Image (cartoon, rainbow, N blue to C red):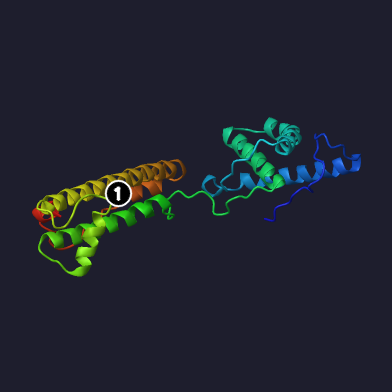
Amino acid sequence: MEHIRLRKGPLPGGRQGASGAGAGRDSMRTANIAVTAIMETRSTPLENRPRLPRIALSKRNRAVVRALNPMLVTYLEASRDLCETDSILFGAALVVCRIIGAKLSTAGRTTGQSSAIPAWRTRIEERIAKARALIGRLICFRSGNTRPRIVRTVRMAFAGTNVSLSQPDIMQKLTERIDDLKQRIAAWGKRIRRYTERSTRFNQNRLFQSDQKRLYKLLERPKVCVAGQGPDQADIIAF
């Protein structure tokens, strides 16, 4: 539905004095937008409603709210239950957003797992990949591989320290560096797991409120098991 906006002139209830005809036209437009939004909200399921943005408490936005409040009395008095009251209040908030020109998300509220990956998670996954690659190079050097690329990577790993590749305890320093990288990988992975578990619980709670039958079907769905023998436990611990 096409959004209707008021002109950026004097608002009803504002300090900028407007002519009686202009104020009347603004009131009529606001009333038309209110009726359209409330009727639209009543016929829209909860999960398909647009997500409302945060609105600044400016003088103009407060004037819009003050002008809209008297129009809601008729709808609230005729409300029969809490669901209808909720739809009326949501429609009023939608009217304010449309009048002031706030951007609304047209995708609606999702009840399933969100496909958007946070930027911080992408950065952490890149750090984990780089740390694993560095661990592999360090292990190769510790095993006796002295190719120029391996040596250059080891020197970069100890850059900014007093560690030299020719000192006697270089093997101990390599082991300490590898253990430090493994601990960092474990901490980063734990952070991602906590976020994934929290996101899963949040989405399940949202789905429980909107469609319990679908949630129970998802919970009863058997997990897919990969055929074949898994890696040895000792190899996993060593890695």
Report x, y in % for residue 191: 32, 44
Q: Report the quarter where the N terminus lies.
A: bottom right
Q: Which residue is mark 1?
A: 220
Q: Quadrant of the C terminus?
A: bottom left
Give the left or right position of residue 51, taking residue 193 as reference: right
Q: Is residue 36 left or right of residue 213?
A: right
Residue 23 horizontal/vertical position (percent):
85, 40
233 above or below 9? below
Place of residue 164 in the rendered image (x, y in percent of width and height, measured from the top left): 18, 55
- Residue type, label 1: Glu
- Relative to the observer, which residue lies in front, 167 or 59? 167
Residue at 68% of width from left, 32% of height from top?
A: 76
Q: Say if residue 113 shows up in the picture.
A: no
Q: Is residue 93 visible?
A: yes
Q: Residue at x 26, y 55 (%)?
A: 131
Most foreground residue, 106 or 102: 102
- Circle 1 Cα neighbour tier, 10 Å, few/some/many (<14 / 14–19 / ≥20): few
Is 36 on the left-hand or right-hand side of 166? right
Above or below — where is 92 with respect to 108? Answer: above
Residue 65 lies in quadrant? top right
The secondary structure type at the circle numbered 1 is helix
- How far across and down, in percent of the image, does residue 151 sit? 20, 64
